[in-house]
Amino acid sequence: GTTDDYCLSSNNCQSNCKPSGGGGGGGGGESASNVRATYHNYNPEQVGWDLNAVSAYCSTWDANKPLEWRKKYGWTAFCGPVGARGQASCGKCLRVTNTWTGAQTTVRIVDQCSNGGLDLDAGVFKQLDTNGRGNAEG
């Protein structure tokens, strides 16, 4: 959903999860450029969107969120150069753009990583890697 239950920062989702409408300001969140993104096989569809099944760091706090909430956005681990880390990042949403192609999607932080950027679910990575360059460059 796009209701406050899903997208208020007090409910662990940044304001950029909601459609921004016309003109005006952005989501008010932090941003970073040239962030490294790798992929991880969470396979959320195959595990019934169960954060416990994939041993996601955020499962402690988010595993019992409604199924609709867990399915709303693709999953990612986050260890980026800006923004909250650890529990404070769990459930937050990020707008991710492939700077080579302009492909964009919104992802939800469900895990932590150590690559200095994002560890996207493989399906999300493929969705963004529209020219195959990300996969080719590792």
Image (cartoon, helix red, strand yellow):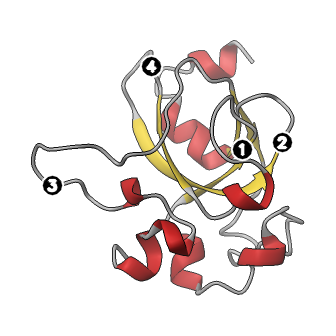
- Circles 3 and 4, Cβ within 8 Å, touching? The answer is no
Q: Badge 1 is on which residue?
A: 78
Disc 2 crowd rating (10 Å Cα; few below 14, some 14-19, many 20+) is some
Q: Badge 4 is on which residue?
A: 99
Q: Nearer the viewer, mark 3 or mark 4?
A: 3
| Quadrant, the N terminus | bottom left
Against 53, residue 125 (above or below) is above
Spatial separation of the CA atoms under disc 2 and disc 3? 33 Å
Viewer-proximal residue among 77 and 26: 26
Q: Which mark is on residue 113?
A: 2
Q: Which mark is on residue 3?
A: none
Spatial separation of the CA atoms under disc 3 and disc 4? 23 Å
Give SS at disc 2.
loop
Q: Badge 3 is on which residue?
A: 21
- Total count of labels: 4
Image quadrant in which you'd find residue 75: bottom right
Dot 3 amino acid type: Gly
Q: Is residue 30 left or right of residue 58?
A: left
Q: Nearer the viewer, mark 2 or mark 4?
A: 2
Disc 4 crowd rating (10 Å Cα; few below 14, some 14-19, many 20+) is few
